[in-house]
Amino acid sequence: MTEHGFSDVAVDSAHAFRAIMQAMARPGRVTDLAVRLDAPAPLLASTAAVALTLCDFQTPVWLTPALRSDRVMHYLRFHAGAPVTPEIESAQFVFATAEEVLPAPELLLQGTHEYPDRSATLILQVTGFAADGVRLSGPGIRGSEGFGVAGLDARFWTAMAANHACFPVGIDVIFTAPGQVAALPRSTEIRIPEAV
């Protein structure tokens, strides 16, 4: 099967954008993101949908080794127009998988207090979500909520807690799983149970 972008660009990109915005507005809430496209393995369709929705010729992307294939790089360049950079510190979007050693958040663009929007977003491809794991609180969350992501351990959550402590600078995270998306904005506070 030929790899292609959105079947209906206007409809599919609007659907994907709405799902991403809902995920960002309600941290830790898993949102369905079913789209009609074919992405080159190992890129999930949901990860590709996020890329085609958020990335363009002005947003350099960086890929971890598992995703840095010629087919994936060509797909992102062709369908999103996004330049793939070898320098993580210049990327506005960083694509990674939970199975890899993840780059330290402090290596990514952090933004500044004057321009906090000049920061990177980590798009983290995962196998699935769970209701338990860490406790999230902050904007968009009533009280606190449990949130878990397959394949991530306490080191990741400790790094994200430190990322939150730097707010309003820091990175945002969008998790993609088969047919689903969730988000962890830097404004979200993370409490890590001892068992994680």
Image (cartoon, rainbow, N blue to C red):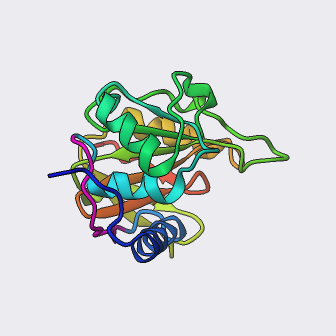
Q: Position of residue 160 (x, y in %)?
A: 50, 42
| Residue 18 image position (x, y, % from top left) | 48, 74
Q: Can residue 133 be seen in this snapshot?
A: no
Front residue of 43/120: it is: 43
Which residue does the image show at 23% across and 58% down from the upper left?
178
Residue 132 visible to the viewer: yes
In the image: residue 44, left or right of residue 11 = left
- Residue at point 29%, 29% (across, down): 66
Q: Work out whether residue 58 or residue 44 is closer to the camera in this orientation and state it.
A: 58
Percent position (x, y) of residue 23? 45, 67
In the image, is residue 84 above or below residue 57?
Answer: above
Q: Tell whether position 143 is magenta.
A: no
Residue at the limit of the structure toward the right, as seen here: 114
Question: In the drawing, does residue 161 fall left or right of residue 196?
Answer: right
Residue 135, quarter of picture: bottom left
User: In the depicted view, which residue is nearer to us: 109 or 81?
Assistant: 81
Image point 69% across, 48% down: which residue?
A: 167
What count of labels does the image hold?
0
Q: Main secondary structure of the magenta part?
A: loop
Which quadrant holds residue 95? top left
In this view, the residue in front, 113 or 159, is 113
Q: Residue furthest left?
A: 1
In the rendered view, would you say 43 is above or below 62? below
Q: Which residues are magenta?
A: 30-41
Residue at the image point whose x is 48% and y is 60% from the top: 53
Q: Which image quarter holds the C terminus?
A: top left
Q: Quadrant of the rendered structure where residue 145 is?
A: bottom left
